[in-house]
Image (tube, rainbow, N blue to C red):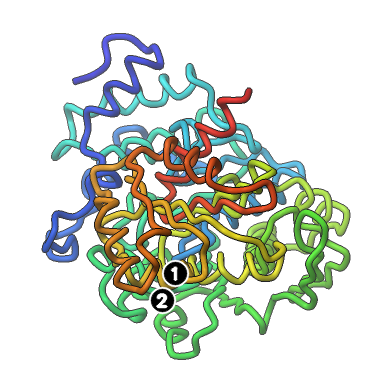
Amino acid sequence: MRPETKTASDALAWLDAHVNRESLGVPAGASRRKTNPTLDRIAAIVELLGSPQLQYPVLHLTGTNGKTSVARMATALLVGTGLSTGAYTSPHLERVNERIGWNGVPIDDDALAAALDAVAAVEPFLPGPPSYFEILTAAAYEWFADIAVDGAVVEVGVGGTWDATNVADGSVAVVTNVSIDHVDYLGPTTADIAGEKAGIIKPGATLVLGETDPDLLPIFADRGAARVLRRDVDFGVRANEIAHGGRHLQLFTRAREYADVFLPLHGAHQADNAAVALAAVEAFLERPLDADVVADAFAAVRSPGRLEVVGHQPLVLLDGAHNVAGAHSLCVALADEFPAAPRTFVVGLLREKEPREMLEALGVNGASRLVCCRAPSPRSHDPSLVAAAARELGVDPDRVDVVDDVADAVRHGIDISSANDQVIVTGSLYVVGAARHALVHSRN
């Protein structure tokens, strides 16, 4: 039912009344791939709104990991060149406003309410009830048109082909990487997943391909892109060194070399994300960028919840690693950039993740303590099952605790750690968002 007023609380209540597949996921034993996914509802919404997604050029990006970081970097680069830039990312950590931004600033409550109300006005004419994500996607496209952005950076929710964002016609399509994740949605193999992600590539577009597996290249190259720019061939990283508070990089594209770039993010993998973002923005603008613009934009990038330090004594680090590849990247970053110290992992997982695989990838056998908590989502694993998986891996039961609530689990992890220890909160962006809210905003 359409909200009675345009206040933010009314609009968000209306939004929350719609099915949120991010929250509910796929029922156990089911597969979304067998449920006839469709773009009919989102296509009908944007048509009734006057096709706002076609009123500005779109940089459309997908990938298993790194999407939001690349989106933030690309947005910073575009804003640095003077373009009015919209950005749509997902999921949010704390507030839904985070998903929709203009020049790096989240949409305010009044503007969000107005955009949602525009979608609510056309809902009675749709072929079926829209989902939470479809509504937000349409609202973002509508708002970007209303404020007349020069371009928009749009991150796929899941996959590509059947993602609601795919009603846009991206002039540049970006694929950060491909690894196993969301198998109920995308399929069990990397080839299946690559095929779904390749669905955002429109004929005549430029493809910026961060995935380097040669076996997957034909899946992307056969989609009719006018140009294919490949990482380590047409763009990439010349140097990637640890620096205080981040990384010191040298990047290259077909157009030029970009030396002396400081990126204030942890993790060697962020260098690859930076190279992808830079190549994508060059392709979007069809020109190289000024070196000072690149340096200033990257130096200002922040990516909350991605190897983010939010406390000291003990060091408290949040990372939204939610699949095996992400867990491995987290472990590499911890080994490379943080001093060896006793570590307590605070972990909550969603039910589509296999606990033993995730815990093994996180290296919990080498941790001092493991605190298992419940992700604030109906899709959460029971933390006692995660704890049982740890014991099956050989973790001493005396080093495993179960604390259901995220905030309580993080506080417990801090309380059992000494000043020189480390507390790593990970396993799900839902867990990281709840932890960030408790840690960051409780002291503001």
Assign the N terminus to one quadrant of the image.
top left
First in sequence: mark 1 or mark 2?
Answer: 1
Task: Tell me residue 151's x, y (percent).
Answer: 59, 45
Vertical placement of 407 versus 111: above or below?
below
The foreground one among 276 and 92 is 92
- Residue 223: mark in rendering: 2
Q: Is residue 406 visible?
A: yes
On the rendered structure, is 373 left or right of 352? right
Residue at 75% of width from left, 62% of height from top? 287
Classify mark 1: helix, strand or loop.
loop
On the rendered structure, is 317 left or right of 197? right
The foreground one among 335 and 411 is 411
- Residue neighbourhood size for the residue with mark 1, other residues' Cα within 10 Å, grouped as few (<14), some (14–19), many (≥20): some
Task: Tell me residue 190's x, y (percent).
Answer: 36, 79
Dot in front, 1 or 2: 2
Vertical placement of 301 versus 287: above or below?
above
Vertical placement of 261 versus 150: above or below?
below
Task: Tell me residue 263's x, y (percent).
Answer: 76, 57
Which amino acid, by three-letter code, is at mark 2?
Arg
- Residue neighbourhood size for the residue with mark 2, other residues' Cα within 10 Å, grouped as few (<14), some (14–19), many (≥20): some
Which amino acid, by three-letter code, is at mark 1?
Pro
Circles 1 and 2: CB atoms closer than 8 Å: yes
On the rendered structure, is 434 left or right of 31? right
Residue at 68% of width from left, 80% of height from top? 234
The foreground one among 214 and 124 is 214
Residue at 43% of width from left, 42% of height from top? 409
Residue at 39% of width from left, 66% of height from top? 396
Label 1 and label 2: CA atoms lie apart by 7 Å
- Residue 203: mark in rendering: 1
